[in-house]
Image (tube, grey):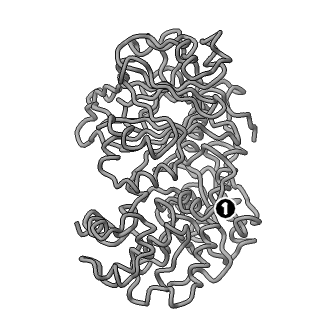
């Protein structure tokens, strides 16, 4: 499954990712996984442009949902974020490059000290910072702040310089930035955020004998990215920091948390609803249908569709919108792990036989790079113990099903027909697209994790996503294929990656149960036949 149309084991690494993006000599070392069961420090970078262009209720809903420990104001219009939000939230709001003293915040239990560098080029003073945040335990030894707490520094000068012709990129401003950072704070588990790097950009750089430093972008970039590309402005970025230096970065669209995030509501309909005093998803769900149909541009069918979508999101339930049935046999839930969005392998097939809580999970994983025996084992089970049962995946028609077909064609062509003849069912497609769609889904997007989370599902693994898993696998594969001496190849924590895959199939089974419940709803709660509408398929009439 991917949401884009969208053996030997070892403990987690204690170093941050060393997958260099600039041809550095760090080699294909494995990215760090967060310590198991650790809750991260959550830093939300939010631009003033997002605050200025979004309804106040939308920003409030986003912040409440993401629940950050610290908020960082970023350009454009960074200076309006604090005044707009200070009275509404009780966490610290930092801004980089203002005043003569750094903005500082400390998270609960002194776990992380977040420092936004001030203007100028003066080095940071650890003693002053320790005194300002009231950490008396380290005031006698200010340099020990980095031992007592994780350090996160935020700068606005480290930027990316891209040569599109040489296809190379370098970080500018590191030397001057390094001169401002205390030596004791330049450690593998310290994290360096830059508002001058585009949101989501991550890299690890060496600085002479000082060792490696991890840089994460939380703003915008003015780098010339070459023909056909643009420096997109991401209005919000959520950075999750873990004590070992592992980082998870998510780009966030604030509009997904408000009325504009409801499928079928574009700029024109948003303005119509706002003029009518309807400014939140909950208000849209509660407005009498007759009142909605009287608004300009909203007829009976459109009003019913957007209201049902709003009800799904405001109540965290799946709501029926169509009459198509789900498979009438007990399904087999599957999810695959690959080496990326354009995969050359499906090295793991996770299978859930049964329900989300008590179903039996099976992991079919390759035992050597390029070995396809796990595919045969999967097909042996599927055509034997699970014969005749439908195979269910999320976005399966676009990813899981064709990828497995390609892998069987490569490794076991004699099994392709048995696979392609099997009843394959894409639950996402059924809900949002089949005959106009059959269910409105909760969650700010239709990604598996967002929908399942809204329905109350809780994962057993933390800080892992499909991109991280793919990076781990490809780094491991590069070691195996390279000149690494036998016995020195560092293997991923296979057990933990298999648990991540198990989380996904149990999340899928959770969604499926709720789709079944929605499909059983009384006929009067369903959209009448012939008036089905697709979640996300209504035209944006602006």
- Measured as percent of width and height from the top left, residue 275 is found at 27, 67
> In the figure, 271 relative to 474: above or below?
below
Residue 136 appears in which quarter of the rendering?
top right
Q: Is residue 170 visible?
A: no
* SS class, disc 1: helix
Q: Which residue is drawn at 43% across and 40% down?
A: 86
Q: Residue furthest front?
A: 87
Viewer-proximal residue, 285 or 504?
285
Q: Which residue is drawn at 44% across and 73% down?
A: 285
- Measured as percent of width and height from the top left, residue 61 is found at 46, 55
Q: Quadrant of the C terminus?
A: bottom left
Report the side of 420 relative to 49 (left or right). right
Q: How crowded is mark 1: few (under 14 residues within 10 Å), some or many (20 or more)?
A: many
Q: Can residue 117 be seen in this view?
A: yes
Residue 150 appears in which quarter of the rendering?
top right
Viewer-proximal residue, 462 or 399?
462
> In the figure, 13 relative to 534: above or below?
above
Report the side of 28 relative to 285 (left or right). right
Q: Residue at x 41, y 76 (%)?
A: 287
- Measured as percent of width and height from the top left, residue 91 is found at 52, 39
Report the side of 57 relative to 25 (left or right). left
Q: Which residue is drawn at 35% across and 61% down?
A: 260
Marker count (numbered): 1
> In the figure, 56 relative to 486: above or below?
below
- Measured as percent of width and height from the top left, residue 50 is found at 34, 46
Q: In which quarter of the image is the N terminus?
A: bottom right
Which residue matches tag 1? 506
């Amino acid at each position: 499954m991917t949401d884009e149309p969208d053996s030997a084991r070892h403990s987690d690494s204690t170093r941050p990712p060393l997958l260099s993006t600039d041809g550095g000599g760090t080699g294909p070392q494995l990215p760090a996984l967060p310590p198991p069961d650790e809750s991260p420090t959550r830093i939300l970078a939010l631009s003033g442009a997002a605050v200025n262009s979004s309804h106040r209720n939308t920003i409030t809903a986003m912040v409440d949902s993401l629940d950050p420990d610290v908020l960082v104001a970023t350009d454009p219009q960074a200076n309006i974020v604090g005044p707009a939000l200070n009275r509404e939230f009780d966490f610290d709001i930092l801004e980089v490059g203002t005043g003569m003293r750094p903005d500082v915040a400390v998270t609960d239990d002194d776990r992380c000290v977040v420092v936004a560098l001030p203007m100028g080029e003066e080095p940071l003073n650890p003693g002053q910072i320790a005194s300002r945040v009231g950490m008396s335990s380290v005031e006698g030894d200010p340099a020990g702040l980095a031992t007592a707490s994780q350090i996160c520094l935020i700068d606005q000068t480290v930027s990316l310089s891209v040569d599109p012709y040489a296809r190379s990129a370098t970080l500018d401003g590191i030397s001057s930035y390094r001169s401002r950072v205390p030596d004791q704070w330049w450690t593998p588990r310290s994290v360096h955020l830059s508002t001058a790097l585009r949101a989501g950009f991550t890299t690890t750089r060496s600085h002479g004998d000082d060792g490696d430093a991890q840089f994460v972008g939380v703003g915008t970039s003015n780098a010339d990215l070459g023909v056909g590309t643009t420096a997109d402005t991401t209005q919000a970025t959520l950075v999750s920091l873990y004590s070992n230096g592992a980082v998870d970065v998510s780009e966030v669209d604030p509009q997904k948390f408000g009325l504009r995030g409801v499928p079928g509501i574009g700029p024109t309909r948003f303005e119509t609803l706002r003029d009518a005093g309807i400014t939140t998803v909950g208000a849209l769900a509660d407005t009498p249908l007759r009142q909605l149909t009287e608004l300009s541009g909203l007829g009976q069918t459109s009003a019913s569709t957007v209201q049902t979508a709003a009800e799904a999101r405001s109540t965290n339930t799946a709501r029926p919108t169509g009459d198509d049935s789900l498979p009438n046999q007990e399904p087999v839930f599957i999810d695959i792990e690959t080496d990326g969005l354009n995969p050359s392998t499906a090295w793991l097939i996770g299978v859930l036989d049964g329900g989300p809580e008590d179903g039996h999970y099976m992991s079919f994983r390759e035992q050597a790079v390029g070995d396809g025996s796990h595919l045969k084992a999967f097909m042996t089970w599927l055509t034997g113990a699970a014969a005749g049962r439908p195979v269910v995946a999320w976005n399966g028609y676009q990813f899981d099903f064709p990828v497995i077909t390609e892998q069987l064609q490569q490794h076991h062509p004699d099994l392709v027909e048995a696979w392609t003849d099997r009843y394959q069912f894409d639950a996402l497609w059924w809900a949002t697209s089949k005959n106009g769609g059959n269910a409105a889904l909760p969650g700010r997007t239709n990604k598996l994790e967002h929908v399942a989370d809204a329905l109350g599902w809780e994962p057993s693994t933390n800080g892992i996503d499909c991109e991280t898993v793919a990076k781990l696998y490809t780094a491991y594969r590069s070691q195996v294929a390279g000149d690494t001496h036998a016995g020195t190849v560092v293997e991923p924590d296979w057990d933990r990656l298999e648990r991540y895959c198990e989380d996904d199939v149990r999340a899928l089974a959770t969604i499926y149960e709720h789709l079944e419940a929605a499909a059983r709803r009384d006929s009067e709660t369903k959209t009448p036949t012939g008036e089905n509408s697709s979640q996300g398929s209504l035209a944006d009439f602006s």
